Amino acid sequence: MGPQVRSGRKIHMVIEMGKHTPLVIGILIVCLLCAPVLAGLPDGNRMEQIGQRAAYTAMSDLGFTNGDYNVVVLTNAGRAIVDGQTTERAISGITKISGLQNGDNTLWVVNRPEWKPLWFYFYDKKTGKGVYLEPDTSFYTKSNAEVSQVRFYDTFSRHVVVNGDLEKMLADTEVGNKTMKDLGGNSGVVAIANAWAHGAPYDMLSAVMLHDHFCPGVSSGYILAKYVEEKMPITGGMSYVYISSPRWCKDDVFPILWDLTPGKGGHYIYDLSQEDQDGLTAYYGTRPAGIFIRWDSKAKSGHALLLGFKFDESTWTGPSWGEKPKKVLDMIENLQTPEKYVVVLEEFDVNESMLADLKDPAKNPYEVIGVICTTCK
Ligand SMILES: [Zn+2]
């Protein structure tokens, strides 16, 4: 049904019929049995309707059918709270109509503050086309009767179809500039969708969802984590402790990949001064990323790697919006060769007292391991 129809009018009819006809009898019965329980339903149904309308609109604009693996939808549904309503059922609505779902790696919920507007971005990697939608906020408060009069295309106050293929955008800067302008404050979806299209792994995308954008910084965290997992694999009662210093976007990878969260510990950040950063970078020839410890809680001992990370520092001559997304794609293509980026600056064993010192927020970890000495002179 739905996927075959292309016009907004026809789609409108399909969803209203498909929704109401089978539901009418069921609703009547349920009303008789437990009327008070129904009081909470309309809000959730409204979100589901919005998700369905978003899916139908995107399928019409981009011309894809149910469950197309070439399409991904990015959204903050489930994170956004609009008009006091949570928005997770918009995700159900999208999946019911388009078949796109997280378990197929075709639906991702991007982290955003709860107070930001609800949005959807569908991207087809085969055609390079994307469609960006934001519901008209009046849709949240309309009565069901009023909603049934709203045509699909009128559900959204922002509705733009863009060329979202980064390679094409870079090849024709005017096209690229237009895409970035049309997407405005949400233009970060271009980097995520293109990284997805270039095969960014599921766990990498999971970390990116928390970080809310795809940048070389968060990519460096993923590459560092995978390097550590390979060189110091976890067995038995072992776990990782990460003394991050200095902080950058990489730090948002570890809560997802290693379950190291601010609340539970295991991930400590020491904000290194610029002077120390510059000094260490000059000393090692590589920017330090921090100390990764594999800790054995039974033996009360650990092994540590001080790692550095080499970013691609080559001069960028294209449009400014293109540099970071393009560098992300390069990093994804090189995930199998982390040694291109990661350098072991030091390797050493850690005992309990050293671990306590490294975790101490008042102590510079590079002083703890004896690389920096402030009292030597
Ligand atoms: Zn970032």
Image (cartoon, rainbow, N blue to C red):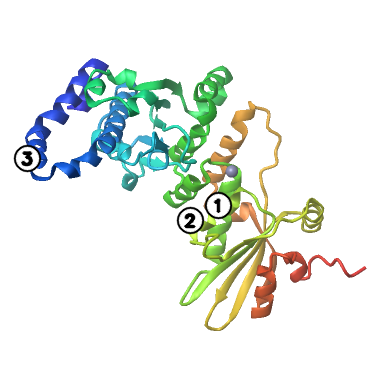
What amino acid is labelled 1 in the image?
A: Asp
Q: What's the residue at 56%, 63% (across, down)? A: 228
Residue 10's disc is: none
Question: Disc 1, ligand 1: is the CB inside 8 Å?
Answer: yes
Q: Are marks 3 and 1 in contact (CB under 8 Å)?
A: no
Which quadrant holds residue 34?
A: top left
The x and y percentages for residue 260 are: 52, 62
Marks counted in the figure total 3
The x and y percentages for residue 276 are: 80, 56
CA distance separating discs 2 and 1: 8 Å
The x and y percentages for residue 77 are: 38, 38
The x and y percentages for residue 277 are: 77, 54
Disc nearest the viewer among 3 and 1: 3
Spot the residue most to the front.
Answer: 36
Q: Is residue 99 visible?
A: no
Residue 252's disc is: 1
Category of crowding for the residue at label 2, using alpha-carbon neighbours closer than 10 angstroms: few (below 14), some (14–19), many (at least 20): some
What amino acid is labelled 2 in the image?
A: Ile
- SS at mark 3 in the image: helix
Which quadrant holds residue 369?
A: bottom right
Which quadrant holds residue 122?
A: top left
Against 73, residue 183 (above or below) is above
Residue highlighted by disc 3:
29
Category of crowding for the residue at label 3, using alpha-carbon neighbours closer than 10 angstroms: few (below 14), some (14–19), many (at least 20): few
Against 248, residue 95 (above or below) is above
Residue highlighted by disc 2:
256
